[in-house]
Each structure stands twice: as C-alpha cells, then as structure tokens.
Amino acid sequence: MMGKLFQVRRSMALASLAAAFAIGGALTGWVVLSTHAVLGANNDVTLRIASVNAAEGSVNFNEGFSSVVTPLLPMVVNISTSKIVKSPRNQLPFFNDPFFRQFFGDQGQTPRERREHSLGSGVIVNPDGYILTNNHVIDGASDVQVTLSDKRTFKANVVGADPRSDIAVLKVSETKLPSMTLGNSSKTRVGDIVLAVGDPFGIGETVTMGIVSATGRKGLGIEGPEGYEDFIQTDAAINPGNSGGALVNTRGELIGINTAIITGGGGGVGFAIPIDMARSVMDQIVKSGRVTRGYIGVGIQEVTPDLAKAFGVSSSEGALIGSVAPDGPGAKADLQKGDIITSLNDQTISDYRDLRLRISQMAPGTTVRLVILRAGQKREVAVTLAEYPEKAEAMAGPAPAENAMEGVQVETLTPDIARQLNLSPNARGVIITDIDPDGPSAEAGLQRGDIIQEVDRKAVSNMNEFQTAVREAGKKPLLLLVNRGGNTRFVVIPAR
C-alpha cells in the first residue's frame, strides 16, 4: 500500500478451485519449489544480445507495430501454476463454543486444503527452452505448466529463483524454440515508445503500447524491504496475468520483465525489471544455482536536509553510515558511523538506495573505491566486498521527520537490561523508558526501548551525561545516534 490512495498489485491472475483435498495421504508427492534441486547449475546458456551500436528502429505509425509484434508473439508464453493452500474449514462463531464442540469435536476448526491456480507470463530467451519470468509467478507452486502460442503445453522445471529481484528461470524440454533478443536497458530513455506483451487474465496473447514514463524507480517497496528495485516505469497497460511478460522497444528487443502495477484514482502505472538486472541474475542462477551479491558491512540511511545540516555538508547526496558490522568489510577498511559515502568507483552516489543497488550488483571479492566525508574532510577508502549474508544487518530506510525531543523519559542502560534486549552487556547509553505517544518525539519515530548512545557525536553512558549533553545543545538541533534492535542510525531532533 502506498499511502491511502494507491495500491501495489502484482500483475498475476489468481483463481481458486472450491474442491478441497483430503488431509494427509492425498498430498504425498507434492513438492514446494523453494526446496527444488538446481537443474541448470554449471551450465552455459547462450543468449542473443543486441548490438551495443544497434541503430534506432524506424516505425511507420501509419502501418502500426505489426512488423515488430508479429515475430515476438511466439516468444511470450503463458505460465499456469498450482499450489495447495490451507484455510479454516468454518469461521462460524459457534464452532468455538465448548458446548457445540462437546458433540461435534474440533472438525469445524480443522483446516481444509484446496488447490489455488495462478496465471502469469514468461519470455523465451534461449532456443533450448530457457524462460525468464517473475519469482512471484512461481513462488510456492507445486506444478508449473508453460503454454506456447501454438497451444502446446509443457511441464516446466524451475532452474532457480531470486526473490530479492523477483526473477525466476524456468526450463522446458522442447528445443529449437524462437527466442527474444535481449536489448540494453541502460540505454532506455524517458519518452521511448515501448510495447508490453503478455497474457493478461488468461485470455490470450495481448499487446499494449505506451512510453517509458521514468527509469531507475527505487524505494517503492514492491519487492519488500530486502528487495532490489531499479524499475522501468511505463504507462503501457500491465494487467493481471502480465507478470513475467515482455517489455520491448520498437526494435523488438527485450528491455524489461513486467512485474507490477500501482493503481489509484482510476488509473495505474506499470513497472518492469530492467533486462540488464534480469540477465545478470539469470547468468548466476544458470551457472551456480544461486545469486551472490556484494556486501560492504554497513547500515546506511538517507542524508536528509536536517542530517546534512547537522553534519555540516551542503548537499543531501550520498549515503550516511549509521552502523558498522563488527569484523565486516567496512570495519576492516576503517569505515565509521557518521561517514557519508559520496562516490563509488569515481561515480557520484545519489542516495543510499543507489549505493545499496550498485554494491549488490558487484561480485564478492571485488575491491571498490569509496570517497567519504568524515568531519567535513574528504577521504578515499578501498573496501573489498564480502558475500551478502542471509541475515545481514538491515539497511536503514529514510529517516522520519523529527521534531523537538519532548515527553521522553530515559534511564541508564544497565547490563541486565542490555541482556534482555539481546545486546552486549558492555553496551552503553540511555534507554527510552516512556514517551508521550502524542508528542513530537513519538511523531519523530522514537520509541520505548530505543537506546541513545551519542548526542552531537559525543558518547553518553548514563543519565547525567545525556542530560548534560542535551542541556549544552541549548536551542541547537540535536544529533542522536540511536540503537534499535542492535542496529544504529542517526536522527536529528530540530531545535525547538
């Protein structure tokens, strides 16, 4: 949900059969895809890539786009999946009545199992049956069927999937299939004409036309807090069932994999994963069965105007380091809390999402050059990336808008309290024990249990030090380092 007016919808059509399956033996043999064996590992798959210097195609609008579309239709497939889902057999309140259950037992509360069907689309990218689609199209499915434009249907195997980018690779046994040429999504420009090809609502192959409305869309939350987003936005209609379908340019080159639509106010805008990202993910899935990403070992956050002012910098560009993982790559390179990363390999960092995405696209073991601002001074730091762990510390999101720190009560953090919070007994600071829920500090995002460890870059280890630091700040804004759940980040409290 984006605000109250907009809704993010996966462009996948869902349908459920009312028939329930018997519990137990009838389910024997069903396999959830999250535990599948990797079928394509250590294989090389040849993809047809458009020339970097390919000239723009010329389209005669009087004749339409049939010359572009017609060859593409056999390359886009329908994907149907099914899985077993559980739901309560009966939600009527009397099934919870002890008197009723005395005679009828718990049968009314026994979950029933039914088969749920979903529809999506996919793109053939290799003649030997390799197909690109969205992870959410096949996620959790126990059976995946692919139907070609000539109505032939094949059982598909999942080579691998990457939930964080929402890309999955399928393979069917058929060979000598028509396959789509992959374009260069980095050359896509706002205003380019694009065509979306898919099978919306399961009614059959459908083509819609629009333009590229924006590129590099990040922070929409479509892929969740751990997802990686760099969407192409388009006004070409992307409807339920279009997920995994093709977004192509006027030369018929695949530039994106359609994935979602945001609706609201009677309209909607569609989003596609750039083919450059999808291709990188596919290459790794096919070669090794999984996706590895670079890891710098720091928690980062947006440089808001208030934070920029507090740190004495003139620009809100870059990524502010709020926490550093012990023994991680950043710690080994002497990155510190409060450093602002402004450049990666001589390219400016626009914001924390930009840095996070670019680091994720680099291989572990890569050494990168960072330019940082520390206490107003520029420094260059070399960091050798590690592999992103499954349970890495969260990348901090944008700092909320804070106001004056009023209605907050604190007490010294003791070793016993630290242990209860799963922190080191040596952790120091003051813990917020009470906060006015209607006060400005609560609106700022501060919560009970937050630990304030620094005030204006000075460590505070008890109430006296905290109160002294706040008093010395007077009417100036307060720069706090706050620890929540083991992750630290900076928060600015504007002057009263």
Image (cartoon, grey):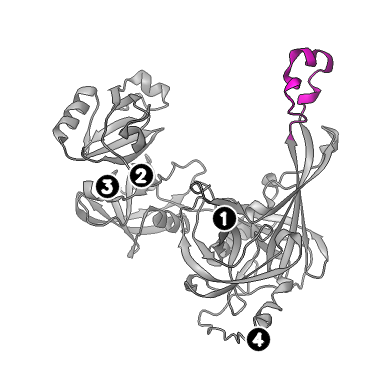
Disc count in the image? Answer: 4
| Amino acid under disc 3 | Leu
Query: Which residues lie in the magenta part?
Result: 87-110
Residue 82 point in image, percent of width and height? 76, 48
- Residue 307, which numbered label? 3
* N-term-proximal mark, 2 vs 3: 3
* N-term-proximal mark, 1 vs 3: 1
* N-term-proximal mark, 3 vs 4: 4
Residue 203 point in image, percent of width and height? 76, 63
- Residue 399, which numbered label? 2
Residue visible at 27% across and 54% down in the picture = 372
Pointer 1 with pointer 4, Cβ within 8 A: no
| Amino acid under disc 1 | Thr
Q: Is mark 3 on a helix, strand or loop?
A: helix
* N-term-proximal mark, 4 vs 2: 4
Which residue position holds label 4? Answer: 63
Characterize the local packing of mark 2: few (<14), some (14-19) or many (20 or more) Cα atoms within 10 angstroms. some
Residue 468 shown in magenta: no
| Amino acid under disc 2 | Ala
Pointer 2 with pointer 3, Cβ within 8 A: yes
Which residue position holds label 1? Answer: 263
Residue 177 point in image, percent of width and height? 75, 72
Quarter occupied by residue 496: top left
Characterize the local packing of mark 1: few (<14), some (14-19) or many (20 or more) Cα atoms within 10 angstroms. some
Characterize the local packing of mark 3: few (<14), some (14-19) or many (20 or more) Cα atoms within 10 angstroms. many
Residue visible at 35% across and 63% down in the picture = 345
Characterize the local packing of mark 4: few (<14), some (14-19) or many (20 or more) Cα atoms within 10 angstroms. few
Would you say 187 lies left or right of 472 here? right
| Amino acid under disc 4 | Glu
Real-space CA distance between mark 1 and mark 2, rounded to the nearest whole angstrom: 26 Å
Would you say 393 lies left or right of 69 here? left
Q: Is mark 2 on a helix, strand or loop?
A: loop
